[in-house]
Image: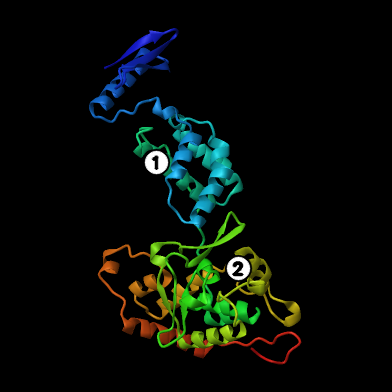
Amino acid sequence: MAWAEQHGSDWRVRYRLDDGTIYSENGYPSEAAAQERALDVESDQRRKRFVDPRLAKTTIDEWIRKWADAQGVTPMTWSTYSSHLRNHILPFWTGTGLGDIERIRVKGWVNKTLRSTLADKSAKDILVLFSQIVGEAVNEGLIGSNPCHKLRINFTDSPERPHASTDEVDAIAGRMDPDDGLLTITAAYTGMRWGELAGLQWIRTYLDENPRIAVDPEFGALHEVRGQKLVLGPPKTPASARDVHLPQFLVRELLAHRDRNPDSRFVFPGARGALRRRSNFRQRVWLPALAGNEALGWAPLKEGMVFHDLRHTQETWLIEDEVPHVLRLERLGHKRKYTDDRYSHVTAAMIGRMLAQLQLRWELDGGWSWIMEGKDEAW
């Protein structure tokens, strides 16, 4: 039972909780407003949807600590979560009770605080994480609803990502040293992610009669934790643990690459065999290749393209070559979402035709050589 009563100059709503305690909600401006709230409380109690208001006083800080202890995500994912929590969520919401997180305040936080300094994609990612955290508080019965649910914010659409032609990939790779160039070629012709290639070991690279790269489910990707520590861990998703079949030209190039680096554990190591950092590769290798070099007659090429766009490149080539959708999903490590995907299967014939098309691309438009400074030998 709930009832309204005058309290000073305002009105309050009182009701009995499950443990017999009488709880008061103060600050209603009129008897009508208090009576309406009392009716809502009685309705929720009858339908077993009532949330003990004392639980809603749990602060976001307390809840995040409990929420964090229950997560089982990859080191890379947790590094992203931790950054969002440390830099954006807790600085704004610290000390706020879960029940005091108002929908309109969330909207203002996103539009006025996050979007003032961050790209829309980053702001959206932070909101998604915050909604996930608060949503689990709803599931635990701490609050009755998620103030982030279906929040209307007009994020700008991400622009379509660029891709490169076969000739453009060759040109970009040809502006790098042989090992970096082959890393770029491998990314374009396999669609593998940066972390999968940077963490690739020779023991998972098979260059025999069934040439392929096996992305290990436990140690198949290199992760940068908080931008500092480099660790091997699972690839991005369970579907990313896969076999990536290789065309013959890439087998030959990888064999020659191994001969140049006979003592390396990793296929694409950094300087002195160390693990590669994405930021170092981007600044020292990738961006200079795109920017060009006037002294060498290299014009700027595909400026604005990032390494990950080589995955878009591989997908585009596969579509051009009419590779079946189910094989494209498997090659890029994407989950099968639709009924047609689950009822279709990858066959050896499909793989053979795909590899033949990739080989043909290389033979018609690909191939490259490097003239190393101070040498007449072409790689």
Pair 1/2: label in front: 2
Look at mark 2 in the image and give the residue it sits on. Answer: 275
What residue does disc 1 label? Answer: 135
| Residue at position x 45%, y 47% in the image | 128
- On the image, the x and y values in percent for residue 339 come to 26, 64
The vertical placement of 234 against 106, above or below, is: below
How busy is the neighbourhood of tag 1: few (under 14 within 10 Å), some, or many (20 plus)?
A: some
Using the rendered view, name the quadrant where residue 11 is placed. top left
Q: Is residue 366 visible?
A: no
Q: Amino acid at mark 2?
A: Leu
Q: Which residue is found at the position 46% from the left and 84% from the top?
A: 207
What is the secondary structure assignment of the residue under circle 1? helix
Which element is circle 2 on? loop
- Give the camera-side residue of 217 and 243: 217
Kind of residue sitting beneath label 1: Gly
Q: Quadrant of the C terminus?
A: bottom right
In the rendered structure, the answer to whether residue 225 lies left or right of residue 218 reads: right
Q: Position of residue 208 (x, y in %)?
A: 44, 87
**Where does the N terminus fall, quadrant-wise?**
top left
- For the residues bearing labels 1 and 2, Cβ distance under 8 angstroms: no
Q: x and y percent of residue 283 in the render?
A: 67, 66
Q: Quadrant of residue 41?
A: top left
Per the model, the C-alpha gap separating discs 1 and 2 is: 38 Å
Query: Can I make out residue 223 in this image?
Result: yes
Q: Which comes sooner in the sequence, label 1 or label 2? A: 1
List x then y, in percent, for residue 332: 42, 70
Specify whether 111 is left or right of 47. right
